[in-house]
Amino acid sequence: MKPVEIAGVWKFYGDFPALRDITFDVEPGASMALLGRNGAGKTTLLRMLAGLSRPGRGTIRICGTDARDRMTRRSIGILGHGISLYEELSAIENLRLFARIYGVEDADAAASEWLERTGLEKVRDGLVREFSRGMRQRLAVARAFLHSPSVLLLDEPFTALDDRAIALLQSLLRDAIAEGRTVVLSTHQLREALELATHVALLVRGRLAYTGERTGEMLEDTGWLYRQYGEPQSVTA
Amino acid sequence: MRDKTIMVLSLLAAVMFAGNLAIILLVLPDEVSQGPIFRIIFFHVPVAWTAFVLFFAAMISSILFLVRKDFKYDSFAAAATEVGLAFGAANLLTGMIWGRIIWGIWWTWDARLTSMLVGWIIYAGYVMLRRAIEEPTERARMSAVVSILAFADVPIIFWSIKWWRTQHPQPVVYGGGFLSPGYWYMLFLNWIPILLLGVVLLLLRMRQEQTGREIDALRREVHAF
Amino acid sequence: MNPPAGPPMKAPHLSFFRQASTVAWKDLRSELRTKEALNASFAFALVILLLFSIAFEPTEDETRQISGGLLWLVFAFAGALILNRSFARELANDCLDALIAAPMSGAALFLGKTLANFVLLSAVEFVCLPVFGVLYNVSWTHQFWPLAGVIALGTWGLTVVGTVFSALTVNLRLRELMLPMLVYPILIPCLLAAMQLTGPLVLGDPYTAELSQMLRLLVAFDVIFSALSLALIETVMVR
């Protein structure tokens, strides 16, 4: 039973196919970098993996059950573009809230533990509204990892982070991968993301152009994959 | 094929209308208490029935869309609702004209008219909602939910307003039930061309919806890459 | 095969009611901290009460006669502000996505929010009542508990329908416009029944057989729309 199985997935907006016949799997303990230009369908695909939307055709299975299944969602951790935290609640309140919703047995303990791991224990009662950008990002990371998910889905996680948050996230992801958890992250070919990846998948115009192991070549020349299989490298990638 | 269907149905409706109008205007005698204006009932009532049938069909189609995810059900629901609105408006207008001529007032808070007005506003909201959602799949989903909630409310609205009006009686546009069999026959006879007209308009509107979706898809294709 | 995912999968802590109450508490705590919707709602209710007096200058007797209608107009309009905020508060920071992706059924999220809205709107209503009594010199307490019961039933109808439409319209640009436009006509039977029942309770009139029909209507409305909303909410929230 693989952590992520995507079979024949299409996504339609009306009659327009944003994703066309996507099929690939992610092996246990692998970390997959999802590459592609803006509009290629990375976020659309990640949202379906997260259970936020349904495929028009095809199936998505996480740990053997449908992505939308409630128990399955229990084992998925998500870090999207927004921090998904409530401004008017404090750090500890936010984490406790999500711990409870995710069914963590001792919500208080888990929340406290993760505040420490992300270096936020001193501001546990501070309102998120008053946090700096870096602090919010770290708290968002805490929220994503809080319930010990076995599958982590991250949408361009390194794009808006400051140095401290990047270092934290990298270390947490390395630990997660070492523990055998599965990571799928979308990226604009940033080196930080590719370093962590064992495999890559390239989306071009909603189609899967390439999937396979992440080679050293890809790491050294981050535009290589695009030139081989996709569009010419864009400057802003 | 559909074009031919539309032509045939339109022709049929037109012929029946002509025939019915002849009967209604020339053959039938004046009604005892209300005079010539009573003939408006042969339009006022069947358009209401047609609107009701269309809103019901829209709800069924909405449920089918949610289950089957096929956009033809969404096109049908949208078209049926809009055409239903047109017929509902016809019911309201004929009712107002009738009331004006009989009672001298444009609006009497008659139970049936009031219920139709409330329903009309709800379904006008449905149309506004559709205009406000740009993405076709989301638009279809949301309007399907509204269609189901709206039609579930229809019987409740009817019942509650009827109760309200029996508590505080007002002039009634059409007493209901006190018609000779000949009149009932004419009512049903005139319902047929009206229903046919509804179907024709529905088919035309459906086609428009489907074409609109195709254009949307093409536009997305062009802009996406 | 798979690394430990914390506590076992069939966690009893994922219970429907526990999650719904977590969401409800979250909403209430958030709102009590900012008080944005509450203040706006109170203020709006006050303004309507004032405007009504200015517009019609009703005598005490007249006011008592129309109290059912007046109170529920105030409750319905003030309620729109609370209901609009309900799902809109989740848009900032993509919180709504986090809630939908969580192992929580749409129904639990919906129920939690409806409960929170119910509490908030009830709070506004029970502050409006004494204000109404003072401004219009009307005594409304003789049949307090039946009145509270009717207000509860009517408010539940308002919040159930309002919350489901709040979810439906959350992503619309014209949300503030579309929500009342859609919700009020659908609520007409509920409001009608509540108005018809509230009037006599404030007046101190006896409870008639006709009124019991209105009570049944109100209960039926609440049950039907609660059931339909719970059934349809998942469709509304998952794209």
Image (spheres, rainbow, N blue to C red):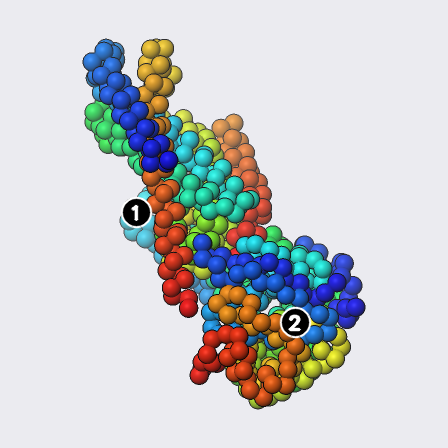
**A17 with respect to C11 (left or right):** left
**B167 with respect to C159 (left or right):** left
Name which residue lies at 60% across and 55% down. A58
- Is residue C167 shown above or below B196? below
Q: Is residue C72 visible?
A: no
**C199 with respect to A54 (left or right):** left
**A186 with respect to B154 (left or right):** right
Q: CA distance from mark 1 to mark 2?
A: 64 Å
Q: Chain of mark 2?
A: A
Please name the residue that numbered disc 1 is placed on.
C57
Q: Is residue A180 visible?
A: yes
Q: Amino acid at mark 1?
A: Glu
Secondary structure type for disc 2: strand
Mark 1 on the same chain as mark 2: no
- Is residue A27 shown above or below C11? below
Name which residue lies at 42% across and 40% down. B76
Residue A108: x %, y % from top left = 71, 72
Residue C218: x %, y % from top left = 52, 38
- Is residue A222 shown above or below C102? below
- Quarter-wise, where is residue A176 in the image? bottom right
Name which residue lies at 60% across and 58% down. A8
Please name the residue that numbered disc 2 is placed on.
A152
A41, C146: nearer the viewer = A41
Name which residue lies at 49% across and 28% down. C210
Q: Residue furthest front?
A: A228
- Quarter-wise, where is residue A26 in the image? bottom right
B225, C31: nearer the viewer = B225
Residue C25: x %, y % from top left = 61, 62
